[in-house]
Structure formats: structure tokens, C-alpha cells
Amino acid sequence: MSIASVTAQQNNAIAAAATANAGSTSSPASQAGKTALTSLSSNFNNFLKMLMTQLQNQDPTSPMNTNEFTSELVQFSSVEQQINTNTSLTHLIELTQAGEVMQASAMAGKQVTVSSDHVPLQNGKGVIQFTTPASEPVDIAIYDDNGNRLSDNMMMSVKGTNTWTWNGTTSNGSSLPDGSYKVAVVAANANGTTSALATSVIGTATGVLSQSNGMQLKLGALTVPFSQVQSAGN
């Protein structure tokens, strides 16, 4: 085994650890860091053995250049520090996520307002909020995930925040099961045009999820990022 091959192995070790830590924040990433350190230690011992052998057998009239060995030692030290940093960062992320889950769990059972274009139907009830700049006719449509219009409702809004409660029935009077349904609110403007309005929904928080893209809040069948939570009450 040459010094070059030892260097290649140590670089492969840190590359594998960095890739594992970048793609996961769970215990397998920590295990990958331990594996990389074990491989690095083995390579470092082989390097020292080769160094001692070459020093013992060098030509006294043409001694070896120590710059290369010094560079190799610095590389091993840098790789070890990076692996340890990645492993420590993984542990910190795991602890932080566990703490976030515990804090978020305290929201379970509370009424929560979130920004969403889907309304959670819970116990046969869904609550939608929207804002209009003036009193104007508004159409509120409910769809299933396939885009089929289930319910169509007209109302006259008031200036400011409006709240509308859906009883979970379709336009033909059929009752729908609890779930998550798409909602679209369109206002009829005074100039004859229409405009889509942003919606918020109110529901009961039923749980939290910790996913790779962040913490998620569940309102029955609806799951939204915590960044979309607007308020939480009792």
C-alpha cells in the first residue's frame, strides 16, 4: 500500500461520512461517523508504519523530503476534526428536533388557525376565514382531491375578516366523511371582474410530525408546516 492509496482511503472515509450526515439527521448518520473514524484510524496506523519503514530504509546520502509526510499528517488531523464536527452536529440536530416535538405536542387539542387552501372537516365541521376589502358577493367552492366540485355556496361578505362554517354536506345534500378538502374563495368585484382570495382555516390540532423538511402540524386529515400557523387558542 502506497502513501497515495492511504490518502485516497482517508478521503473516501470523510466523503462517506459527510454524505451520510448531510442526508440524514437520525442515528444512522452518527453510526456513519463512527465508521469513518474507525476507517481513518486504520489508515493512519498504516501510514505511520509505512513512514517508519521508509525512514528506516532511506538512502543516507539522499534523505527523504519530510514535507510530504507533514502534509499527510495535517490531512489526517483535518479529516478527523471534520468527522467529529459532523457527528456532533448530528447529535445537536437530533436533540433540537426532540425538543421541538415536545413543545409542539403541547398544541394538541387546541383550536389553531393556519394559512391553507384545504379545509379540515372534523366532526362534520369545517371553518374557513378570508378577508375582503369591502362588502361584496363571494363564492365559496369545496372540491375533492380529484378536482370534483362538491359544494358551491354564495354569501355577501363584510369588509375585513369573514368566517364561514361548512357543515360537511354537498350541494345535493349528501354528508361527506371527515377529511381534508380543497377550498376556493372567489369575490365578485364592483367592476365586474373576479378575484381569488387567500384563505385560512380553523381546526383542532391533533398531532405533530417531525419530517426532513421541518415540523408539521396535523389538523385531522390536514397536515401543514408550522410556518403556516397563524394563531393557537384554547
Image: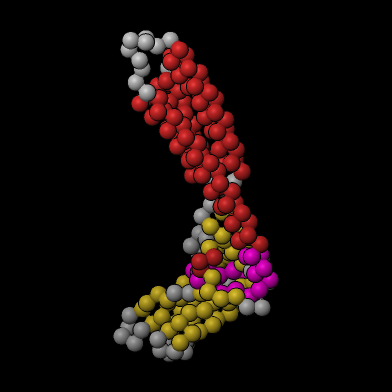
Question: 184 or 151, which lies in front?
Answer: 184
Tell me: residue 163, above or below residue 213. below
The answer to whether any part of residue 40 appears in the image is: yes
Q: Residue 12 colored magenta?
A: no
Q: Give the range drawn in magenta.
A: 103-121
Residue lying farthest front?
61
Please identify the quarter of the rendering in which residue 188 is found: bottom left
In the figure, is residue 4 to the left or right of 48? Answer: left
In the rendered image, the residue lying farthest to the left is: 191
Instruction: Mark yes or no: residue 171 visible.
Output: no
Q: Which residue is drawn at 45% across and 19% down?
A: 51
With 175 as the anchor, is 1 left or right in this view?
Answer: left
Image: 32 above or below 1: below
Magenta stretch: includes residue 107:
yes
Residue 122's x, y, as percent? 65, 70
- Point out residue 30 in the picture as x, y percentages from the top left corner: 59, 41
For this rendering, which residue is in front, 133 or 84?
84
Find residue 24 and report its horizontal and vertical position in percent.
Answer: 54, 45
Identify the colour scheme used.
Answer: secondary structure
User: Residue at point 49% right, 31% down?
Assistant: 13
Residue pictured at 54% horizontal, 82% vertical: 163
Q: How many labels does the image show?
A: 0
Quadrant in which the C terminus appears:
bottom right
Q: Is residue 109 above or below residue 22?
A: below
Q: Which residue is drawn at 49% across and 22% down?
A: 48
Can you give x and y, in whole percent of width and height, for residue 34 in the image?
Answer: 58, 36
